[in-house]
Image: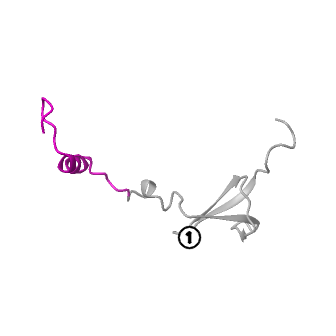
Amino acid sequence: MKPGIHPDYHPVVFKDTSTGDAFLTRSTATSDKTIEWADGCRYPLVTVDISSWSHPFWTGNQRIMDSAGQVEKFHRRYGRRTPGGAR
């Protein structure tokens, strides 16, 4: 790797604003805010709106799409085609 062209990769705390959960990881993200972590060190704090603790896919609260209902809605709106091209 070429020296001097890569961003600084350092420990950062990401905090989910909707659940309050936080985790320490490494990132190139920077922030003016800091937080004292359980190990007694201060790390930059990056707040995020959605993380794995609040995202519907990971929490199991995702919406199930009713594909059959969507198809029926389409047929009601635009009509069902019959074989031969007539409605």
Residue at 21 percent of width and 46 percent of height: 78
The three-letter amino acid code for the residue at tag 1 is Gly
- Relative to residue 7, is residue 36 depicted above or below? below
Q: In which quarter of the image is residue 23?
A: bottom right
Q: In which quarter of the image is residue 44?
A: bottom right
Q: Closer to the camera, 72 or 35? A: 72
Q: Which residue lies furthest to the right in this view?
A: 3
Residue at 71 percent of width and 70 percent of height: 35
- Relative to residue 75, is residue 24 depicted above or below? below
Residue 39 counted in the magenta span:
no
Q: In this view, does 52 lie to the left or right of 24?
A: left
Report x, y in % for residue 16.
57, 65
Residue at 52 percent of width and 69 percent of height: 18
Q: Residues within 10 Å of mark 1 (few under 14, many from 20)?
A: few
The residue pinned by badge 1 equals: 20
Q: In this view, does 46 lie to the left or right of 85?
A: right
- Relative to residue 75, is residue 60 depicted above or below? below
In the rendered structure, which segment of residues is drawn in magenta?
Answer: 62-87
